[in-house]
Image (cartoon, rainbow, N blue to C red):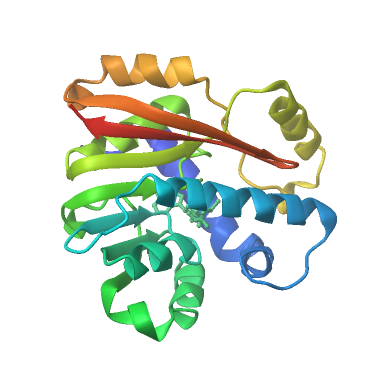
Amino acid sequence: MNPTASYTQRRSQIEHYFDRTAVAAWERLTSDAPVGRVRATVRAGRDRMRSTLLSWLPQDLSGTRILDAGCGTGAYAVEAARRGARVVAIDLSPTLVDLARSRLPADVAARIDFRSGDMLGAELGHFDHVVAMDSIIHYSPEDAVAALAQLAERTARTIHFTFAPRTPLLALMISVGRLFPRGNRAPWLEPMAAEKIAALMAAHPGLAGWQSGRTQRVSSGFYQSQAMEWSRT
Ligand SMILES: C[S@@+](CC[C@H](N)C(=O)[O-])C[C@H]1O[C@@H](n2cnc3c(N)ncnc32)[C@H](O)[C@@H]1O
């Protein structure tokens, strides 16, 4: 299916942001280097989110194929590969993917295939599990659910994704963010209500064989994100 114009437009803003504007900040945030207080809350929240998502997968992942959709610097892919999975890890930003490759520990190097490009590419193949950690948070709820539905066509078991929850605190942070000079701004988060996601999921023909399961919100200072599990019925 062809992506919508709004998906394509947002995707190119995201690529520009993560491949240029934010590379240095992401390199630091995703390392052990010291960061300021605000970023420390984000780092702690992201660590909690990653372990939550990893805890939703079976402990032994031998023989499974996983797509890390929007892998950034690859931390999730490394942990999944350590548990035996074969991982395709893809990101729009070639610079972040290069960074991920340069950080790749030798013990899992043979099990992770890093690529740069769109997570929806059919050439990536079929998977048992797909994870999209904080990678669909900048798309509209309609485009995000349509993207997940495309991934679902090629997924045998579960999709784990996160979304920006609709909370007063997050709304406040987004409006403060809008005050920053344009060049420094991240692409807008698109807060979503869980009910909206459920309604879009129910209405999407491609998701007829899917149900939602666990959900977990992580709130850590400036990091607000909610994980959701979809699985085949
Ligand atoms: C907030 S970062 C999170 C990275 C990683 N999942 C993590 O948690 O460390 C979001 C990433 O999603 C990627 N992304 C967004 N849309 C994408 C798409 N359509 N295809 C591939 N990557 C995408 C961005 O380039 C960015 O690196």
Q: Quadrant of residue 159?
A: top left
Q: Would residue 150 appear left or right of 135 to someone viewing this image?
A: left
Looking at the rendered structure, the number of numbered marks drawn on it comes to: 0
Residue 143 shows up from this direction:
no
Q: Would residue 212 appear left or right of 138 to someone viewing this image?
A: left
Q: Could you tell me which quadrant the C terminus lies in? A: top left
Q: Which of the two residues, 18 or 172, is positioned nearer the viewer here?
A: 172
Q: Quadrant of residue 84?
A: bottom left
The picture places residue 63, in percent across and down from the top left corner, at: 16, 62
In the displayed structure, would residue 128 be above or below residue 177?
below
In the displayed structure, would residue 100 be above or below residue 164?
below
Residue 76 shows up from this direction:
yes
The picture places residue 2, in percent across and down from the top left corner, at: 25, 38
Residue farthest to the front, as pictured:
59
The picture places residue 37, in percent across and down from the top left corner, at: 83, 55
Q: Could you tell me which quadrant the N terminus lies in? A: top left
Residue farthest to the bottom, as pictured:
106
Residue at point 47%, 73% (across, down):
100
In the displayed structure, would residue 113 be above or below residue 196?
below
The picture places residue 226, in percent across and down from the top left corner, at: 53, 34
Residue at point 36%, 82% (across, down):
107
Residue at point 46%, 76% (across, down):
98
Residue at point 45%, 16% (across, down):
196
